[in-house]
Amino acid sequence: QRLFFSAIAVVAAVWIVVLLRRHAEETVFCAALSLILGGALGNLIDRIWLGAVVDFLDLHAMGWHWPAFNVADSAVTIGAVLLGIGAIRADVDR
């Protein structure tokens, strides 16, 4: 399983770098992809060195428990949200 997810992360990283080079003039798109790339590489490093991704942020508030996550997961999530915002803005601009 570790090898499978590591291979997916490497393929995704290579593809993201290709997209970054092709769309260098699109600021929001590149920022979003950079966050996703950073998160993917962060999780890949965890997976290679530690054998698993370490989730160390575990939040509780007023009886509610948020699922555990890490900084890399946050970067991927923020990047995905930016991609969505960029796609919506592109549709509106047409």
Image (cartoon, rainbow, N blue to C red):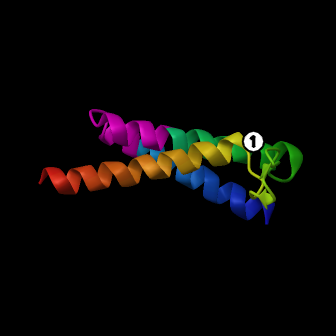
Q: Where's residue 32, x and y in %?
A: 44, 42
- The part of the image, by quadrant, that contains residue 11 is bottom right
- Quadrant (top left, top right, bottom left, bottom right) of the C terminus: bottom left
Q: Is residue 91 left or right of residue 5?
A: left
- Quadrant (top left, top right, bottom left, bottom right) of the N terminus: bottom right
Q: Is residue 42 left or right of residue 34?
A: right
Up/down of 36 relative to 25, above or below: below
- The part of the image, by quadrant, that contains residue 21 is top left
User: As rendered, which of 24 and 79 lies closer to the eye?
Assistant: 79
User: As rendered, which of 73 and 14 lies closer to the eye?
Assistant: 73
User: As rendered, which of 9 and 62 lies closer to the eye?
Assistant: 62
Residue at (22, 51) in percent of width and height: 90
In the image, is residue 29 part of the stretch drawn in magenta?
yes
Residue at (18, 54) in percent of width and height: 92
In this picture, which residue range is highlighted in magenta? 19-34
Name the secondary structure under disc 1. helix
Q: Where's residue 74, x and y in %?
A: 62, 45
Q: On the image, numbered disc 1 is attached to which residue?
A: 45
Q: Where's residue 35, x and y in %?
A: 53, 40
User: As rendered, which of 20 and 32 lies closer to the eye?
Assistant: 32
The residue type indicated by label 1 comes to: Ile
